[in-house]
């Protein structure tokens, strides 16, 4: 058996084909080993993610190698504008190289990197559904505590539009005075500022465990970057919004991967706290699904994840027909700051 001391961990270069091939291979093999029906991101998604690190986003990726073969990989993610002590850790280990200490080495390495980056509060999300108890044990063994349980649900496509229309009609009397719009591609110019404002609320309005989070500070320019990166990865945005006095007060945003993938990713849904109680969440979800049925009839399902305690959004998804696919755990760990060695000079 290969000794873990032979493992070499180094930063990954998103412009290097070998690094990105290895990154995608380990990621895909690891995901499919846990869920043969996992909705994968593409190699192009990975490149877009790892080349997006700039003044607004943190994406640091590392590969763990045995010789020329990548056997594990990690990513440290975070915002460079807000919540500067928070880092999201991604970890994948090639299934053929598990239970050999490589995951522990890779995790230790990225935690030390996070500490050096000033990211004291770490989050990691892992599947903890049936047959995957080992993931929770691994997280807890390394000091991570379960903060939330999230449920991944999927809605089979093509959607039953008659059912969607009935739900939309039932919600409509409750939001008289609001306008529901849906569009494909970039957010229209006149809506971009208020759209960014409500997106910045998602982190604090969605359930987030015990962490004290700041409101997001993204700008319209940051939205420009996100939309360009999605287009470069071959993705198409589908968005529905609710407008009140020309401002976005609710939204549902989904992303359709490039051709060759059979699913759709639901990225976010939120109603502004000042405009709740008007069934706008149901309205924007229905509008989004209508647009999806019209433009992408070839997709097999749309997936979304919600905290188990997010009863209102769960109820909307269940009413639409979403069914449970997987159970995830959101784990948190607080790192102690790196020790500082103080040297006292002798007087005189």
Image (cartoon, grey):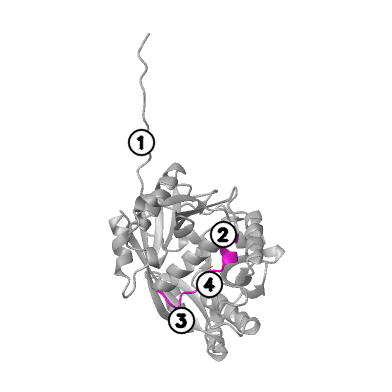
Closer to the camera in the image, 67 or 22 = 67
| Residue drawn at the location 51% of the way across and 62% of the way down | 22
Q: Report the residue that reaches farthest toward the top.
A: 348
Q: Label 2 neighbourhood size at 10 Å, few (<14), some (14-19), many (20+)?
A: some
State the SS at label 2. helix
The residue singled out by tag 3 in the image is 322
Q: Which residues are magenta?
A: 35-48
**Real-space Cα distance between discs 2 and 1?**
37 Å
Q: Earlier in the sequence, mark 1 or mark 3?
A: 3
Tag 2 and tag 3, C-beta contact below 8 Å: no
Q: Label 3 neighbourhood size at 10 Å, few (<14), some (14-19), many (20+)?
A: many
Q: Nearer the viewer, mark 1 or mark 4?
A: 1
| Residue drawn at the location 37% of the way across and 52% of the way down | 105
Q: Nearer the viewer, mark 1 or mark 3?
A: 1
The residue singled out by tag 1 in the image is 339
**Real-space Cα distance between discs 1 and 3?**
48 Å
- When asked about the image quadrant of residue 323, the answer is bottom left
| Residue drawn at the location 39% of the way across and 72% of the way down | 34
Tag 1 and tag 4, C-beta contact below 8 Å: no
Disc number for residue 83: none
**Real-space Cα distance between discs 2 and 3?**
38 Å
Q: Nearer the viewer, mark 2 or mark 3?
A: 2
Whole-percent x and y of residue 14? 58, 56
Q: Earlier in the sequence, mark 2 or mark 1?
A: 2
Closer to the camera in the image, 119 or 174 = 119
The residue singled out by tag 2 in the image is 18
**Real-space Cα distance between discs 2 and 4?**
30 Å
Tag 4 and tag 3, C-beta contact below 8 Å: no
Whole-percent x and y of residue 315? 43, 78
Q: Earlier in the sequence, mark 2 or mark 4?
A: 2
Q: Earlier in the sequence, mark 2 or mark 3?
A: 2
């Amino acid at each position: 058996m290969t000794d873990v001391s032979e493992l070499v961990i180094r930063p990954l270069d998103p412009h290097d084909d070998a690094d990105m091939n290895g990154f995608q291979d380990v990621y895909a093999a690891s995901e499919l080993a846990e869920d043969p029906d996992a909705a994968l991101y593409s190699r192009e998604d990975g490149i877009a993610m790892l080349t997006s690190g700039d003044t607004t986003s943190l994406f640091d990726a590392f590969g763990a190698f045995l010789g020329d073969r990548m056997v594990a990989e990690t990513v440290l993610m975070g915002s460079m504008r807000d919540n500067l002590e928070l880092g999201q850790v991604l970890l994948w280990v090639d299934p053929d190289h598990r239970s050999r200490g490589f995951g522990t080495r890779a995790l230790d390495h990225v935690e030390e990197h996070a500490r050096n980056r000033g990211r004291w509060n770490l989050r990691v999300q892992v599947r903890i559904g049936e047959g995957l108890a080992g993931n929770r044990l691994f997280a807890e063994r390394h000091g991570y505590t379960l903060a939330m349980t999230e449920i991944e649900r999927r809605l089979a496509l093509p959607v039953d539009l008659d059912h969607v229309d009935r739900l939309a009609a039932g919600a409509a009397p409750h939001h008289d005075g609001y306008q529901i719009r849906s569009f494909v591609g970039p957010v229209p110019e006149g809506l971009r500022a208020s759209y960014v404002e409500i997106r910045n609320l998602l982190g604090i309005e969605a359930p987030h465990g015990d962490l004290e989070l700041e409101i997001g500070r993204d700008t319209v320019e940051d939205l420009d970057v996100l939309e360009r990166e999605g287009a470069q990865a071959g993705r198409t945005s589908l968005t529905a919004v609710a407008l009140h006095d020309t401002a976005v007060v609710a939204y549902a945003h989904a992303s359709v991967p490039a051709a060759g993938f059979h699913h759709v990713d639901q990225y976010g849904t939120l109603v502004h706290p000042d405009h709740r109680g008007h069934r706008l969440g149901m309205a924007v979800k229905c509008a989004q699904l209508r647009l999806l049925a019209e433009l992408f009839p070839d997709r097999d399902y749309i997936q979304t994840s919600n905290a188990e305690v997010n009863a209102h959004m769960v109820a909307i998804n269940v009413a639409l027909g979403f069914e449970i696919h997987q159970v995830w755990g959101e784990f948190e760990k607080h790192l102690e700051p790196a020790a500082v060695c103080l040297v006292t000079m002798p007087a005189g």
